[in-house]
Every structure is written in C-alpha cells, then in structure tokens.
Amino acid sequence: MIKRFNLKPLLAVFLILFISACGSTDKPKPTPLESFKPEVKLQYLWSRKIDELGVYFQKFEMLDDVSFIYVATEDGKIYQISKDDGSTGWDVKLPVPLTAGVGLDRERVYVGTLDGRLVALDKNTGEEVWQKQLSSEPVSPPSISEDLLVIHTNDGAVYALNTDNGEQLWKYSSNMPSLTIRGTSPAQFFANFVAVGLANGKLVILDRATGQARWENKVAIPQGDTEIERIVDVDARPLIMRDKLFAVSYQGRVVAYDLQNGRTLWAEDDSSYRDLAAGYGNLYVASSDGSLIAYDEDSGNIRWVQDALLYRQLTAPVLIGGYIAIADFNGYLHLLSQIDGHFVARKRIDFAPKGRWHNDRQWNVRRMLKPNSGVRVPVLVDGNRIFTLANDGSLKAFELFEIQ
C-alpha cells in the first residue's frame, strides 16, 4: 500500500540545495541498501572522465545517435563521445556556464547558458551554428521535432524556434509562483501539439504552429500556509502512451488524461520532479521520497511499490528489456524487475576517491564536492548497453547479461 509522503523535511533540504547549498538540516537519512541475489550481470565495458557536473541540480541529460553520446557539463563543456570505447569525437568549451543540455537532432546539438542563450552546435564538428538570446536561462533540455525546437526558460516562458537558424516562431508565457523548484518541464510533441508542464501546477497543450493553448489542466493545486508547502511544479516531461497523456507534479498528483480532450481519466496523490516511464502496462514514478511506484496505466491502481531506496534521491526511471534502470545520489545504479519491482542487479558507479574543490561560477563561490558525489543524470540505454554519468564526471558503460 502506498504511504502518505512526508515531504516537508525533504523539500526543505531540496530548497537548501537549490537556493543556498549551505547550512544544516534534519533531512532523513538515505535508507541503507540490503543485499540480494543478482539475477542479471552488469558487465563493465569502459569508463572515462569528463568535467564534473557541479553541485547544483541543472537538468542535464545524455542523448545519443548511432555511434556517439552527447553530454554537457555545468562549466560550459560539451562532448561527443564514442559509445564503443569512450573516446572523444570532439569537445568544446563555451565561455559561460551551462544550465541545460543537451538537445539533439540529425544536424545539431543544443545547450542553454546561464546568461539566457540557446546555442546550437554542429553535431559533427562542435562548431557554433547559431545562438538565440532568450528572456531567461533555459533550465531543461530543449525538445526537438523536425525543424521545431521548444525550450522552457526559468521565468516560465516557452519558446518555439526554427532549428536551422534560431528564428523565434512563437512564445507562450505563464504566471510564475513566488517560489519554485529550479527546473522546468521539457516539452513533449504529439500530432500537431506540444505538451508542457508549468511551475504553477498546470499542464498546457499548445498548438504546434502558433503556440496558442488548446487546453490546460491542473495537475496539482497549491495547498498549505507557506510558500514552500505550496510548491507544485510540473517539472517532469509529460509522457504519452497511445491515447493517454501522463503528468506528475511536485507534492501533488500523478494524473492520466485523455489525449484528445484533456479529460481526467484517473489521478492519485504523489510527488515527483523526475521524468516518467511506462512498460508492461505500468506507469513508473520515482517519487520525491525515494519510492518507486508502478501504477496501472488504465486504472491508476498501484501494482507495486519499492520503498527500499527511500531518501536516496533517485534519477528518472529508464527501461531496459524487462527491467527498470535507476540511479541514486549515493552513487549506485539499480536494476529492478518491471513485473514486481524486486532488485535484480546493483553496481557502484561513482568512485571519487576523495573530495575535490569545485569552482561554482553560477554562485561565484568555491565549494568542496564530497567523495562519491552521486548521480542525477538519468541513465542512457542502447540495446543491452547502459551508460551512466556521475556528478563527478565519471562516465561508464556496461552491458547487461542474464545469469544462467
């Protein structure tokens, strides 16, 4: 049975990390890991080091094409890395810190900068193609469909740009609460529309050509007496499965909508700021307290809950075969069964031998990165291969094998 989420201590910690990154708090301790009998093997393939991602929670993610991984780091670096052996195809360094990346299409790689620009690089060479000044810094990776790029900035604006030259096609503006989680929802394309989650707890469906709102719904309604208690950001990318659209908010709900008319099909109390995943008829939510929950896609009934990772700050779930791959802020990669959520494999992927100093240009301070500083970038899956990127810049590749 699902638990009632105790979000206040965790949210206080979360805001401290986002806003001040200093001081002390009575945050819940991560649940100790329990041993189990592995059912699959994660065979190590290669590893390499890139620049660290920094101590803040910029929304970086890895993307790939047939041969390469593309990834960006907080200090302005963008890499093209071979999936076969981890070698560098190219790397470039922009003169300002990055706040979002990467976006990827057939020709270009896209990143957002702290000074509010979206920069497009040639995918084959890393050379700059164009840049576009926006009203605020992008804090989620851009989404691309054909020649349309949609980017969501920290002031609540949603821009549509032409991928060839950065020309602005339209802009949608939303009302921002006085306090939000740092981050915004990446856009999701479907048919002639774009779905975007907003910091005010709403999900909006925009016309792809004009940016006009087709319909919007409240995923969550702010509640409580304090601004912290009233945070209901929809930061996860909306997920579309057949005729349904799924969305989840921070300290609010997970909701299934009819894709055609926005009618609510089911809704359950939950809280998450991570992207969703779906498989085996389940909708998977990495909840803010560290629970991993499988909901029935059609009814919203809970099929299973895995609560052995409480307060370990999970990444977004990613599917590989019949398993769910998820990492945590303590530096572990976990594989779980989609059927019932039991653990099938685990691997330590962050091996920083000692603390190291980090020049945090966003906040103009120098901070110590703790040993084994964890993982916040979702894993990348290609067939039976899993690629992981830790906060300290450790990039690793594994191959999944069944244990006979």
Image (cartoon, grey):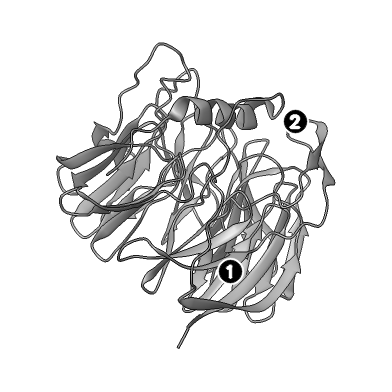
Q: Which residue is mark 1?
A: 387
Q: Which residue is mark 2?
A: 363
The correct choice, above or below, for 374 with respect to 176 in the image is: below
Residue 197, image x and y in percent?
Answer: 37, 38
The correct choice, above or below, for 314 with respect to 135 in the image is: below
Helix, strand or loop at mark 1: strand
Residue 133, image x and y in percent?
Answer: 61, 38
The amino acid sitting under disc 1 is: Phe
Please tell me which residue lies in front, 52 or 164.
52
Q: In the drawing, does residue 210 fall left or right of residue 120?
A: left
Residue 217, image x and y in percent?
Answer: 24, 33
Please tell me which residue lies in front, 134 or 317.
317
Residue 337, image x and y in percent?
Answer: 37, 67
Residue depicted at 47% across the width and 25% down the height: 8
Tell which circle, 1 or 2, labels the residue nearer the N-terminal end. Answer: 2
Residue 207 visible? no
In front: mark 1 or mark 2?
1
